[in-house]
Image: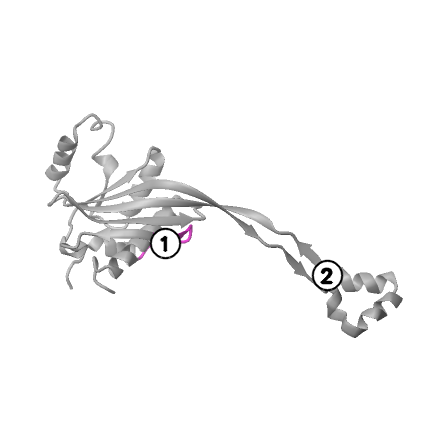
Amino acid sequence: MKKHLIFLFAILVLTSCGSNTTIVNSWRDPKITVAQEHFKKVLVVALVKDEASRRVTENRIAASNPIFKTSYEYLNETTKELTKEQKLKILQDENFDGVVTMRLVSTEQETTYVPGTYTGMYYGGFDGLYSGVYGYGFGNWYGMYSPAYYDPGYYQETTYYMVETNIFSLKDNKLIWTGTTKSDYVTDLGQTVDAIMQAVVQEMRKDGSLPPK
């Protein structure tokens, strides 16, 4: 079996529990598929301001396969003053042939109304027997209606996180695939990274960048 982008196949074993993630849009270089690249050493770059979040994201992906290398090992405080050409040369000297980047594009908030619900009996349910209730004492009346209650409606605010994932070929120094994902109910950064990468892999299978299962 051909080694079609081993690092992306490895991501399929990751499980997603922390968020609901979908692909919003994607693009691929029509002249090349990611599977043709046969990446052997890939740099993972999380473009976030918070260093802790950067490391969590990069470590999560790097842990899935040894060909993944975290960018903070190579591009950090000691290299931040270098030019982009000098940084690129570092990666070339280290024999990197691919780069995966992930960055938060935006956050969006959406407010929706959840209608109320009524649980229990209602007047129309008695039909012809309803008139008999008037003759009951309090105990019978309370026993009949006490299970009934109304749960009022409410407004619910959901935050969506738009994340862009890019795949670059360093051999050609060009972007070969990009996609934007939308995630909500984000409670765990690591699990959300898993969900994003799973969504990316599924989309790449659909557009032919990766071979089908």
**Residue pointed to by mark 1:** 22
Q: Residue at x 21, y 60 (%)?
A: 208
| Residue type marked 1 | Thr
Q: Is residue 153 left or right of residue 84?
A: right
Res. 191 visible in picture: no
Q: Residue at x 26, y 61 (%)?
A: 206
Q: Give the secondary structure at mark 1.
A: strand
Q: Is residue 122 left or right of residue 97?
A: right
Q: Nearer the viewer, residue 35 or 163?
A: 163
x%, y% of residue 212? 23, 64
Dot placed on the residue nearer the N-terminal end, 2 or 1: 1
Q: Is residue 50 left or right of residue 204?
A: right
Q: Which residues are magenta?
A: 13-23
Q: Is 172 situated above or below 87?
A: below
Q: Residues within 10 Å of mark 2 (few under 14, many from 20)?
A: few
Q: Give the secondary structure at mark 2.
A: loop
Foreground: disc 2 or disc 1 = 1
x%, y% of residue 167? 22, 47
x%, y% of residue 38? 14, 53
Q: CA distance from mark 2 to mark 1?
A: 41 Å
**Residue pointed to by mark 2:** 147
Q: Residues within 10 Å of mark 1 (few under 14, many from 20)?
A: some
- Picture quadrant of residue 94: top left
Q: Residue at x 80, y 69 (%)?
A: 130
x%, y% of residue 32? 14, 54
Res. 21 visible in picture: yes
Spot the residue most to the top.
81
The mark total stands at 2
| Residue type marked 2 | Pro
